[in-house]
Amino acid sequence: METSNTPKTRWHRLLGTLLEKLLSPVGVTVSTEVPIMSNPPQADI
């Protein structure tokens, strides 16, 4: 069980770094943390 004090592993950053190292020699650009929406989603709680 994960508590709120446990830091989260940012797997997408690890995967992005790995893919960048593997694919940059063949000319593939890898970008991480790219915004996909102009306005962030909102939710009512």
Image (spheres, rainbow, N blue to C red):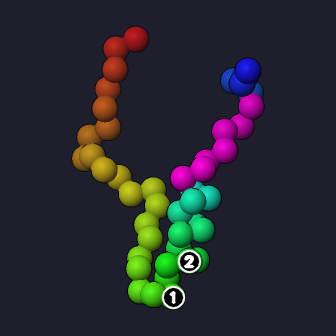
Q: Is residue 7 magenta?
A: yes
Q: Residue furthest left?
A: 38
Q: Quadrant of residue 8?
A: top right
- Above or below 40: residue 23: below
Q: Find out whether the residues at labels 2 and 1 contact each other: C-beta distance under 8 Å.
A: yes
Q: Position of residue 45 (x, y in %)?
A: 40, 11
- Does 14 appear above or below 26? above
- Residues shaded magenta: 6-12
- Label 1 is placed on what type of residue? Pro
Is 34 situated left or right of 13 in this image? left
Mark count: 2
At x 71%, y 37%, the residue is: 7
> Callout 1: few (<14), some (14-19), or many (20+) C-alpha neighbours within 10 Å?
few
How far apart, in angstroms, are the residues tagged by discs 2 and 1? Answer: 7 Å
What label sits on residue 25 in the rendered view?
Answer: 1
The residue under the point 31% across, 50% down is: 36
The local crowd at label 2, few if under 14, some if 14 to 19, many if 20 or more residues have their Cα within 10 Å, is few
Residue 15 x/y as whole percent? 57, 59
Q: Nearer the viewer, residue 21 or 45?
A: 21
Give the residue at x 45% y 56%. 33
Closest to the observer: 6 or 11?
11
Q: Position of residue 2 (x, y in %)?
A: 72, 24
Q: Secondary structure at mark 1?
A: helix
Residue 8 included in the magenta stretch of the image: yes
Mark 2 = which residue? 22
Relative side of 14 to 38, left or right:
right
SS assignment at label 2: helix
The front one of 7 and 18 is: 18
Tell me the amino acid under the disc marked 2.
Leu
- The kind of secondary structure the magenta stretch mainly shows is loop
Residue 44's place in the image compared with 38, above or below, is: above
